[in-house]
Image (cartoon, grey):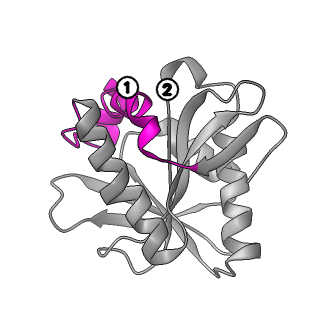
Amino acid sequence: MQTSRLILRRLDETDATFIVELLNDPSWLRYIGDRGVRTLADARDYVRDGPAAMHARHGFGLDAVVLKDSGLPIGICGLLKRDTLDDVDIGFAFLPAWRGAGYAREAATATLQHATKVLGLKRVVAITSLDNTASIRLLESIGFHFERILDMPGDAKTLRLFAYSP
C-alpha cells in the first residue's frame, strides 16, 4: 500500500534493527507490552513468528511503515487476527521522532480502507490501554467508536475496545 508520503510493506528479517528499537521504546513497553525482543536474533524471530506468520496464515499482518522518499522505517501498522478477539483488529506503533506528524493517521486510514474495500471486512476493531489517549484520539478521528471495556485472557491489563463498520 502507498499513501502520499508512505509505503506500507511487509516486515522482513532485514528490519531487525528497527524492530529492536521500536519494541523497546518506552511507549511500546507501556501501552503494548514487553515482547522480550532485545537482540537482532530476537527481532528476526519476532518478525518470522509474528507478522510474517500472520501474513502467511491470513493474508494480512503488521507491515513496516516507511517514508516514501527515503525508505526509512518509522513505524508499523496493519491488521491482526488474535485468537482472543472475534474480529480482525488494527494495530500501529511509531518511533518517537515520527509521532505527531500525521503518519500514524495516514497509515491507519490506508490500512482501514484496505481492510474494508479490498479484504471486504464488515467490521474492524482496535484495542488500547485505558490511558493511551493518543491512540484513542487517532482511532476516533478515523471513524472508530468506543464499544466496551475488555479484559483479555492472559493479559493483566484492562483494555478499551473500539469498533469500525463501513
Residue 42 visible to the viewer: yes
Cβ atoms at labels 2 and 1 below 8 Å apart: yes
Given residues 23 and 72, the one toward you in this image is 72
Secondary structure found at label 1: helix
The answer to whether residue 18 is left or right of residue 164 is left
Which span of residues is magenta-colored?
10-38
Whole-percent x, y for residue 101 in the image: 69, 25
Residue at image point 31% right, 39% down: 43
The amino acid sitting under disc 2 is: Leu
Whole-percent x, y for residue 138 in the image: 61, 44
Farthest residue in the right direction?
A: 4
Residue at image point 54% right, 67% down: 60
Residue at mark 2 to residue at mark 1: CA–CA distance? 8 Å
Q: Quadrant of the C terminus?
A: bottom right
Residue at image point 71% right, 53% down: 109
Whole-percent x, y for residue 162 in the image: 50, 63
Q: Does 152 appear in magenta?
A: no
The answer to whether residue 86 is left or right of residue 65 is left
Residue assigned mark 1: 21
Rendered view: 98 above or below 76: above
Q: Does 12 appear in magenta?
A: yes
Residue assigned mark 2: 95
Residue 166 visible to the viewer: no
Q: Residues within 10 Å of mark 2 (few under 14, many from 20)?
A: some
Secondary structure found at label 2: loop
Q: Earlier in the sequence, mark 2 or mark 1?
A: 1
